[in-house]
Amino acid sequence: MRFLPAFAAAVLMASLSAARAQEVAAGEQIFKSKCFICHAVGQGATNKIGPQLNGLDGRKTGSAPEYDYSDANKKSGIVWNEQSFGEYIKNPQAKVPGTKMAFVGIQDDKEIANLWAYLKRFGPDGKIK
């Protein structure tokens, strides 16, 4: 009878992995449709109109190398995590008045969560963690 709990745990883990993979795939599509024009992520990513987004999870705003941030962004004190990203991406101008990011925002919480799931995978070197 010990087999059943172990099997149930394995099925649960596989389900969670599949769900996470779906979130990442959805996030990638959101990135390509709403973010790619201004930002890059992954190996070889460079700054565009906006900064490259490698290593975003845990990075202090205004700190991407060789990007000319607004003073407002540099002084905001934000450290990127799921919560701060979610608050910012809904309305960047409201969260950081004076930011150069001219973006209408994303209001859908599921889209935001999926986009964060995609972005947080990339380490500072652009490799998937």
Image (cartoon, rainbow, N blue to C red):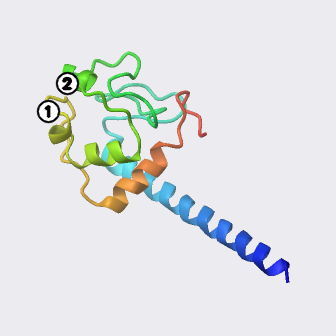
- Residue 8 coordinates in the image, percent (x, y): 72, 76
Q: Nearer the viewer, residue 53 or 36?
A: 53
Mark 2 neighbour density, 10 Å: few (under 14) some (14–19) many (20 or more) = some
- Residue 108 coordinates in the image, percent (x, y): 28, 60
Instruction: Please say if 99 is above or below 15.
Output: above
Query: Picture quarter containing residue 48?
Result: top left
User: Mark 2: which amino acid?
Assistant: Ala
Query: Picture quarter containing residue 96?
Result: top left
Position of 1 with respect to 41 (left or right) is right
Mark 1 neighbour density, 10 Å: few (under 14) some (14–19) many (20 or more) = few
Q: Where, quadrant-wise, is the C terminus in this rendering?
A: top right
Instruction: Please say if 54 is above or below 82.
Output: above
User: Mark 1: which amino acid?
Assistant: Pro
Instruction: Please say if 119 is above or below 50.
Output: below
Q: Where, quadrant-wise, is the N terminus in this rendering?
A: bottom right
- Residue 66 coordinates in the image, percent (x, y): 38, 15
Tell me what residue is drawn at x 47 percent, y 51 percent.
117
Task: Determine which residue is flagged by label 2.
Answer: 72
Task: Determine which residue is flagged by label 1.
Answer: 97
Count of numbered labels shown in the rendering: 2
- Judged from the image, the secondary structure of the residue bearing numbered disc 1 is loop
- Residue 116 coordinates in the image, percent (x, y): 42, 48
Gap between marks 2 and 1, in whole Å?
A: 7 Å
Residue 76, label in figure = none
User: From this viewpoint, is residue 29 visible?
Assistant: no
- Judged from the image, the secondary structure of the residue bearing numbered disc 2 is helix
Tell me what residue is drawn at x 53 percent, y 38 percent.
122
Question: Circles 2 and 1: CB distance less than 8 Å?
Answer: yes
